[in-house]
Image (cartoon, grey):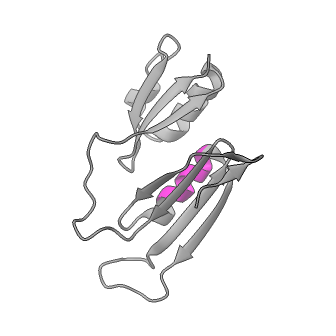
Amino acid sequence: MVAQTNGKTRSAVFITFSGNCKKALTFYQSCFGGILHLEPFKEELKAYKEMPIVCGTLLADGITIHGSDLVHNEGRKIGNYMAVFLECKNSKDRTALIEKLAADRKDLLETNYDIQNLIELTDVFDVRWILAINN
């Protein structure tokens, strides 16, 4: 399902979290705001500590994030082949978002990002973000 706003198609991202979908999407809600909807699995699964999320959706201004705890048969592989690209309105908005996504990573918070057009960071859930400033 692709969200639509004012008749225009809006992009979305789907991320497999493999056991911490609820925690991850709740974290992203604290970063972006929005409405979070979680669909848990109907019964407990042995491999999961908590009830796994079949599909979760965060609908926020400017971004839609879908996620699931259920992975493909080959498992979840972390790599540098995919990143979420997000255009920020200005440097101030981007800095505020970096502070939220960085969480406890002080190395990301001590950098001066004002002189860079593109910023890349990896959050605590191993999701790679590329944050640009809308010129």
Q: Nearer the viewer, residue 61 or 31?
A: 61
Asked whether, in this view, residue 135 is left or right of residue 78, the answer is right
Asked whether, in this view, residue 124 is left or right of residue 47, the answer is right
What percent of the width, then of the height, locates residue 35?
Answer: 68, 58
Residue drawn at x 41%, y 64% is 20
Residue extending farthest to the front is 7
For the C terminus, give its image quadrant: top right
Give the dominant element type of the magenta stretch: helix, strand or loop.
helix
In this rendering, the answer to whether 34 lies above or below 49 is above
The stretch in magenta equals: 24-31
In this rendering, the answer to whether 69 lies above or below 124 is below
What percent of the width, then of the height, locates residue 43?
Answer: 45, 89
Q: Nearer the viewer, residue 120 or 11?
A: 11
Residue drawn at x 50%, y 65% is 22
In this rendering, the answer to whether 21 lies above or below 118 is below
Residue extending farthest to the right is 6
